[in-house]
Image: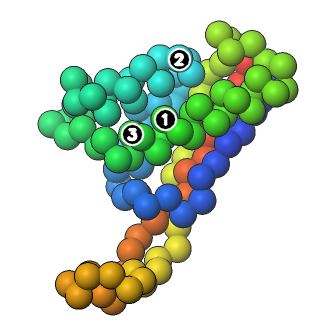
Amino acid sequence: MKTATSSIQNAAISLKQSLIICDQLRGKRLESGKKFLEVLIDKKNNLDGKFYPTTAKKFLDLLESAEANAKVKNLTVEKLFIKKIKADKGYRYMRPKSRWRFRGRRVKSSTIQVEVEER
């Protein structure tokens, strides 16, 4: 099988929102997945009344990175499908020196991975 992968480690996005978007993208063509995310970012379409713009931007970056990796491997971009896409819990860290009200807060992150396949 001809595949290409891409991942983003410790992205500052919610794991819950990431899982919702993963479920929507799994099994789609790469181009239709990118269009779906662009519509979410522009707030023209929603998922259960929510838009998730920050999470959608990270996923769009991830899909564009996977597309670039596929081009390097000489795969046909028009034939690419999203084979695997998943989100995992990233590590939690303390916010660095910032405004007094944010000082000492723990920040959550997510690790997202995608694998595209040529069919």
Residue under the point 76% across and 23% down: 71
Residue 27 place in picture, x, y as percent: 54, 25
Instruction: Identify the image quadrant of residue 13.
Output: bottom left
Report crowding for label 2: few under 14, some 14 to 19, many 20 or more residues within 10 A (C-alpha). some
Q: Give the secondary structure at mark 2.
A: helix
Residue 102 is tagged as: none
Residue 33 place in picture, x, y as percent: 47, 24
Reply above or below: 22 against 35.
Answer: below
Q: Which residue is mark 1?
A: 60
Q: Which residue is mark 3?
A: 56
Q: Give the secondary structure at mark 3.
A: helix
Task: Using residue 3 as the reference point, say whether residue 47 is left or right of it.
Answer: left
Residue 102 seen in render = yes
Towards the viewer: 11 or 24 = 11
Residue under the point 31% across and 33% down: 41
Q: Which residue is mark 2?
A: 31
Towards the viewer: 11 or 84 = 11
In the rendered image, the quadrant that contains the C terminus is top right
Towards the viewer: 39 or 19 = 39
Report crowding for label 1: few under 14, some 14 to 19, many 20 or more residues within 10 A (C-alpha). some
Reply above or below: 34 against 86.
Answer: above
